[in-house]
């Protein structure tokens, strides 16, 4: 359980090489917004065969469903046979660009995963398959201008019955991949006041997207508002009804945060360890000072803690184990540890850590979103406590 298999180790190595040679040089342009990350995501998928591997897994699921074998809901990663592999991919991407990793994970895991696990064969074939192969980019649309932590209670986006279809009206905000998405997975309040999930295509009449937001961090992950002005949807666009589907997706989103935190902390630890061995002050390497040694051990413990969280998360996904208190609490803890690790790494590096060239200040800016997105730290901790106590 606590060791990567040979194939996953190999994939980690080639992804790290690709990040150093291809992704890192693009970061200034991605952060400035002069380039979008979506074509690079598609090229990455083809370079490493993710499109063929994950697309093949989705095609098998479509065939099973058409043959009448539902087989239960499956994430794309589980269907491909190794959830840990995708966590490692996200970790490696997050060492360099947590924003790129987030956009990749939202499109493939949240949107593609929701459609592939809950959709009909026709829905999976039409939308789930191109999302799994990254031929299309997806956005997950839950948050609204007045509905953040109280996403259900304050939701104002509506889907009104109109003959054999629906009319979607409202807006969403802070939407990852919004500026470049082909598919929007939209949550709306139906006539019966229950939450329904719809698959919306970018080119539909009434769909519009705002300009990318200017953000503290995750600048290489374009984020925007999305507007739905009387968008007409056929029954085939309805993915499901009820809050359960949303909570499942929230669980998937939160399960992906520790892998991002793992990448951030690992990079901070590796860079700090190398620096304290090389940097000399007062005639000796700064690693010989006890105060610095305490920081290094602190980073090491944070790294191993989050690494073990990811291993357990992958084991749960592989074996179909649901443990929402663990998912919520570990998301909150991993996010906090990533923020703390990035700030510690900056402190160890001193003025050099504050400079853009080293890349650690970017990780600090990016890490903060992990405490806010997919439910704030407080919301996740309280959700875990309420379920443990039995207050749900």
Image: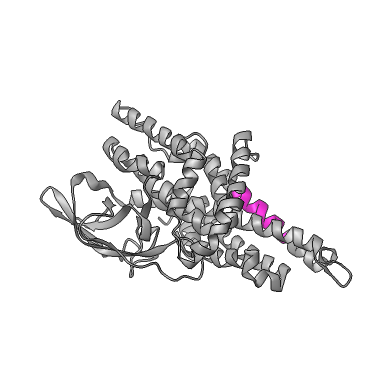
As drawn, 331 above or below 65: below
Residue 292 is situated, as x and y percent measured from the top left of the image, at 78, 66
Residue furthest to the right: 283
Instruction: Please indicate, yes or no, whether residue 35 appears anywhere in the rendered image.
Output: yes
Q: Is residue 306 magenta?
A: yes
Q: In the picture provided, is 256 more to the left or to the right than 4?
A: left
Q: Quadrant of residue 336?
A: bottom right
Residue ID at (66%, 60%): 268
State which quarter of the image contains the N terminus: top right
Residue 59 is situated, as x and y percent measured from the top left of the image, at 37, 32
Residue ID at (62%, 49%): 307
Residue 239 is situated, as x and y percent measured from the top left of the image, at 28, 46
Residue ID at (62%, 38%): 10
Q: In the picture provided, is 23 more to the left or to the right than 360?
A: left
- For the magenta stretch, what is the residue range? 298-309
Q: In the picture provided, is 94 more to the left or to the right than 135?
A: right
- Which of the two residues, 335 or 126, is positioned nearer the viewer here? 126
Instruction: Please name the predominant secondary structure of the magenta segment in the image.
Output: helix
Q: Is residue 136 magenta?
A: no
Residue furthest to the top: 67
- Which of the two residues, 326 or 373, is positioned nearer the viewer here? 373
Q: How many marks?
A: 0
State which quarter of the image contains the C terminus: bottom left
As drawn, 285 above or below 163: below
Instruction: Please indicate, yes or no, whether residue 261 appears anywhere in the rendered image.
Output: no
Residue 35 is situated, as x and y percent measured from the top left of the image, at 45, 61
Q: Quadrant of residue 375?
A: bottom left
Q: What colouring style does the render use?
A: one colour
């Amino acid at each position: 359980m606590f060791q990567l298999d040979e194939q996953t180790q190999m994939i980690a190595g080639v992804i790290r090489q690709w990040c150093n040679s291809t992704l890192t040089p693009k970061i200034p342009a991605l952060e400035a917004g002069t380039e979008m990350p979506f074509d690079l995501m598609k090229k990455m998928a083809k370079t490493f065969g993710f499109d063929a591997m994950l697309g093949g897994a989705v095609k098998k699921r479509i065939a099973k469903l058409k043959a009448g074998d539902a087989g239960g809901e499956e994430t794309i990663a589980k269907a491909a046979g190794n959830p840990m592999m995708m966590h490692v991919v996200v970790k490696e991407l997050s060492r360099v660009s947590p924003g790129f990793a987030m956009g990749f994970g939202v499109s493939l895991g949240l949107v593609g995963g929701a459609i592939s696990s809950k959709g009909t064969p026709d829905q999976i074939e039409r939308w789930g398959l191109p999302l799994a192969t990254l031929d299309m980019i997806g956005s997950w649309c839950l948050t609204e201008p007045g509905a953040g932590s109280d996403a259900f209670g304050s939701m104002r986006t509506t889907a009104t019955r109109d003959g054999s279809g629906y009319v979607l009206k409202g807006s969403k905000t802070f939407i990852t991949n919004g500026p470049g998405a082909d598919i929007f997975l939209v949550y709306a309040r139906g006539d019966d006041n229950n939450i329904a999930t719809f698959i919306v295509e970018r080119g539909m009449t009434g769909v519009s997207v705002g300009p990318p937001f200017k953000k503290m961090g995750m600048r290489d992950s374009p984020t925007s508002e999305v507007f739905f002005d009387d968008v007409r949807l056929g029954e085939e666009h309805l993915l499901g009804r009820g809050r359960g589907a949303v909570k499942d997706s929230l669980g998937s989103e939160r399960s992906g945060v520790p892998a991002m935190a793992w990448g951030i902390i690992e990079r901070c630890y590796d860079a700090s360890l190398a620096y304290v061995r090389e940097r000399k002050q007062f005639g000796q390497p700064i690693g010989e000072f006890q105060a610095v040694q305490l920081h290094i051990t602190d980073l090491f413990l944070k790294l191993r803690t989050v690494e073990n969280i990811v291993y357990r998360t992958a084991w749960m996904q592989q074996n179909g184990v649901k443990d929402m208190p663990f998912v919520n609490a570990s998301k909150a803890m991993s996010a906090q540890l990533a923020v703390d690790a990035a700030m510690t790494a900056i402190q160890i590096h001193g003025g050099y850590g504050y400079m853009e060239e080293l890349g650690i200040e970017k990780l600090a800016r990016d890490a903060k979103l992990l405490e806010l997105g997919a439910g704030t730290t407080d919301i996740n901790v309280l959700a875990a406590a309420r379920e443990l106590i039995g207050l749900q």
